[in-house]
Image (spheres, grey):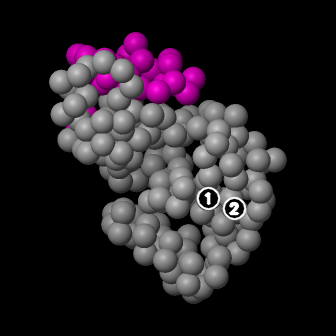
Amino acid sequence: MLKKFTRDMVGSSNRAKGSVYKKIRRSILEAYPMVEELIEDIFPKKGIMNLATCKAGGTKFTFIMDEEFAPYFFQLKNGTPIPTLRVLHQYPDMLPRFQVDDGAIKFVLKGSDIFCAGLTSKGGSMVDVDEGSIVAIFAEGKEYACAIGQTTMSTEEIRSTNKGVGVKQVHYLNDGFWKLKSLE
């Protein structure tokens, strides 16, 4: 989704009101309780949060940034905030872990969706999640996530069907969003 993302795609960016700040902060902490330290650092109770909206690939995104416009989370269509890969590298256990086999890595790093066969083969692995869950995609034998995606079916269905797309990619290493360190 963020493959060809550029700074020019950002429509507007502004400082979040106090009520919006609290709501987003609370939703991040509810979804990812293990990042409480990080949230206290980048979004302290009386701090500043900037929001930027854009439309890419027909999907509306909201980027959640600190006062220096460094993005930490993003939301798809007002859903649950999703961490960026930079945050996921600091907190690798904050999302359910899916691992792809060696053969799928080059395709994942080009932005392809993850097929069931790449997750169910010898080098692939999954934890049990429901359809629509946000997951971290790790490459076989690597320490850090190489992508973030949203499951198109439950883990049970992925194992039993073993055909088609199992995870729709949202953000991956070296996509347009990864290359931007700040949206200022």
- Residue 124 in the figure: left or right of residue 19: left
Q: Give x and y (percent) for residue 179.
A: 68, 40
Vertically, is 25 above or below 172?
below
Q: Residues within 10 Å of mark 1 (few under 14, many from 20)?
A: many
Q: Closer to the camera, 37 or 158?
A: 158
Provide the residue designation for mark 1. Answer: 62
What residue is rendered at 42% in x and 70% in y? 27
Amino acid beneath label 1? Thr
Q: Closer to the camera, 31 or 168?
A: 168
What residue is rendered at 22% in x and 31% in y? 157
Q: Secondary structure at mark 2?
A: strand
Q: Residues within 10 Å of mark 2 (few under 14, many from 20)?
A: many
Asked if residue 176 shows in the view, the reply is no
State yes or no: residue 155 in magenta.
no
Quarter of image, res 75: bottom right
State yes or no: residue 117 in magenta.
yes
Q: Give x and y (percent) for residue 5.
A: 70, 40
Vertically, is 173 above or below 93?
above
Provide the residue designation for mark 2. Answer: 52
Amino acid beneath label 2? Ala
Vertically, is 134 above or below 107?
below
Q: Say if mark 2 contacts mark 1, CB within 8 Å.
A: yes
